[in-house]
Image (tube, rainbow, N blue to C red):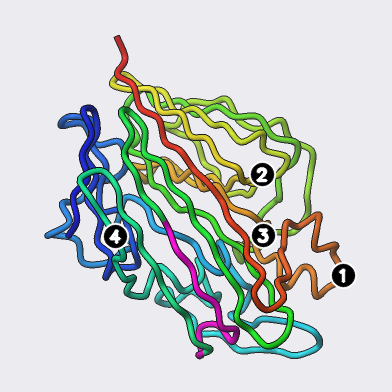
Amino acid sequence: MLELKSDVLRCEIVPELGGCIAGLWMGEHPVLRSTPAAELESARKAGSYPLVPFSNRIGQATLEWQGTQHPLLRNNGDEPHAIHGVGWQREWELLDSDGSYALLAYEHHPDSSWPFAFDCSQTIRLNGGALELTLAVTSHAKEPAPAGLGWHPYFTKRTRSRISFSAAGRWEMGSDKLPTQRKPARGLDADCAFLDVDHCYDGWDGVAHLRDEVMHVRLASSLSRLVVFTNDTRDYVAIEPVSHVNNAVNLHAAGADAGQLGLDILKTGDSIMGQMTISVEPVR
């Protein structure tokens, strides 16, 4: 367990559990769904974890790439899809740290979870009232390979939680939890208590707000797509900056344009990077 502190925030990190953030607190108030690192058993229950080398789902755990089908590991219980990449289920190495900063890295060799080699790094820094993160992926595959990245933070849902952000479109979700079609959408401005949403928005302007009776959280990212998930049975709101649309690699194989999907295709040595900042201030 690694603890970072600023004057305002405290963050606990568990590198061996998917390079995850176990918890983020403003004083005694959890900003993210937070579990003390010593009690955390899985990154899936963490406050946030990195999404590499893809976000959300790859349909039926089968990667369609350049005319070849690559079966992937079904990595989330009974779910038929591959979900959230591989980084959240692997041990990350702590390369550097001090009281407010950590640098983590993970190197991937082709396996049943992902057939292309890559390495990635993430920085996690507390700076006053902000948590600042970067995430980078570099391809080491011998041929051009698909790649994506993002984060999966789970924000604490309180009685008066309200989410707001602007976007241009929303991908509708089928009963199989895969996207079906894109429709115009302006984003969201809604109370969270009975909100039922599990969608990827594109044309996001890079800023989202979550306000409640305790704090105002401002999430900002260099990425232009946002997955939002919550319903009335959840005590959290997942607000996930991501680089590509859900199931993008297979949508591309079916004929959709990679650029419109946000899917990066990396040659050997090529890299992509994203940034995310979570700023927190108390309600006065």
Secondary element at tag 1: loop
The tag earlier along the polypeptide, 2 or 3, is 3
The structure residue drawn at horizontal position 41% and vertical position 48%, both measured from the top left corner, is 153
The tag earlier along the polypeptide, 3 or 4, is 4
CB-based contact (under 8 Å), mark 4 and mark 1: no
Which mark is nearer the camera, 3 or 4? 4
Reading the image, the residue beneath label 3 is: 174
Alpha-carbon distance for marks 3 and 1?
19 Å
The 10 Å Cα crowd at callout 3, few under 14, some 14 to 19, many 20 or more, is few
Left of 90 or right of it: where is 40? left
Q: Quadrant of the N terminus?
A: bottom left
The image position of residue 207, as x and y in percent, is: 57, 31
Secondary element at tag 4: strand
Alpha-carbon distance for marks 3 and 4?
43 Å
CB-based contact (under 8 Å), mark 3 and mark 4: no
The tag earlier along the polypeptide, 4 or 2, is 4
The 10 Å Cα crowd at callout 4, few under 14, some 14 to 19, many 20 or more, is few
In this view, 79 is above or below 183 = below
Left of 2 or right of it: where is 272? right
Which mark is nearer the camera, 4 or 1? 4
Reading the image, the residue beneath label 4 is: 96
In this view, 69 is above or below 29 = below
